[in-house]
Image (cartoon, rainbow, N blue to C red):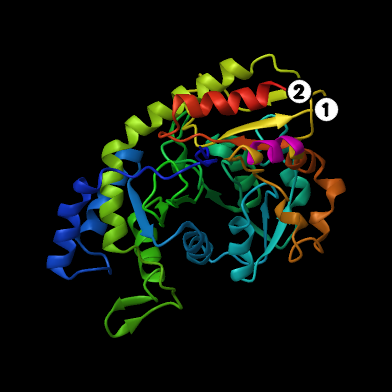
Amino acid sequence: MMQKKIYVTQPYLPPLEEFIPSLQQIWDSKVLTNGGPFHQRLEEALCKYLGVEHLALFTNGTVALVTALQALRITGEVITTPYSFVATSHSMLWNGIKPVFVDIDPATLNLDPARIEAAITPQTTAIMPVHCYGHPCDVDAIQRIADNYNLKVIYDAAHAFGVQCHCGSVLKHGDLSVLSFHATKVFNTFEGGAIVCPDAKTKLRIDHLKNFGFVDEVTVVAPGINGKMSEFNAALGLLQLQHIDQALARRKELDAIYRAALQGVPGMQCLGDSGEKVANHAYFPVLVGDDYFCSRDALYERLREHGIFARRYFYPLISEFPMYRGLMSANPANLSVATEASKRVLCLPIYPQLQPEEQARIIQLVREP
């Protein structure tokens, strides 16, 4: 019998019968987009769940990043990490902004605050860190630097749904935080995203920007984009939210099983800490060292041969892609930690529907030569 394919993550899909009543309401109302009742309810529900005051829903996280930069009128150069998904830097190019890459912290793989100041120039206007794998950046250190140099901070929080730091929701830090609700994320609306805003005035500007700049049907105040979330996606999000605590609890269980099973395996380093209260267990990254029985890429291929599609998040680095590698800040010599991590990292499958026998098969392949 052919074995079931196992991917690094899979979307949680609530029972279809739970979604039918919402679908019928959308059908009957004929309201499909433009801030309908499901959209409004999801914004309110997410604010309550995440512990934030203002949130603007988007059609996806990338458009939300593009709009966040526009909302704060960011220009010039933005300091960021090369160790992320390409949308982080692509959002800058779409705004005519030059990304400036600095290296990452070897323990967290987040943007290293100690490297930021040296990269600041008169053209620097903002910092865009990423809460990599859902683990919080050193938000206090980054904010001190931003305050000293009068810089804005926009967090790419695509992985950080529900993540807490030392003072509450990590999404409250910076000038804006941007979430992704893509199908592969801890919380998803199939496709979607959001910007967490510090105040009502900022949210209003963002709401205008995501709807072509319209204030009313005859007034346009900014060159906005079509970034609105549909009623279908918002309704799915409301249903997903009913199951999110159960999903997070299951992810934590899977994380703990991996750590116990892989502890002591030569050359295998599990990132993060399963006992960490802040984690949402969005990913399960491991670093494959020289004393492991094979290379990272050989392990990647071995798993694929058995129908297990792990991912090398993040490889290659953003700075290695053609549109970025010509930048001075993309020089691998200045990004030694990120370069090394990208050659060693492998994210193993973790999602609520992962069955015990499937996880056991993954562990066996990782543990045994």
Q: Residue furthest front?
A: 1
For the residues labelled 2 and 1, the Cα–Cα distance comes to 6 Å
Near mark 2 (Cα within 10 A), the count class, few <14, some 14-19 or many ≥20, is: some
Q: What numbered label is drawn on residue 174?
A: none
* Residue ID for mark 1: 290
Q: Based on the picture, tell me whether residue 347 belongs to the magenta stretch.
A: no
The magenta stretch is 298-304
Query: Of the residues shown, which amino acid type is indicated by label 1?
Result: Asp
Q: Position of residue 39 (x, y in %)?
A: 26, 58
Label count reads: 2
Residue 113 appears in the figure:
no
User: Would residue 141 be found to the left or right of residue 266 on screen?
Assistant: left
User: Which sits in the foreground, 351 or 165?
Assistant: 351
* Residue ID for mark 2: 267
- Above or below: residue 198 compared with residue 306: below
Name the image quarter holding residue 202: bottom left
Q: Residue furthest left?
A: 28
Q: Label 2: state its secondary structure.
A: loop
User: Which sits in the foreground, 184 or 321?
Assistant: 184
Taking the spot 18% from the left edge, 53% from the top edge, the residue there is 20
Near mark 1 (Cα within 10 A), the count class, few <14, some 14-19 or many ≥20, is: few
Specify the principal SS of the magenta part.
helix
Q: Position of residue 355 (x, y in %)?
A: 44, 29
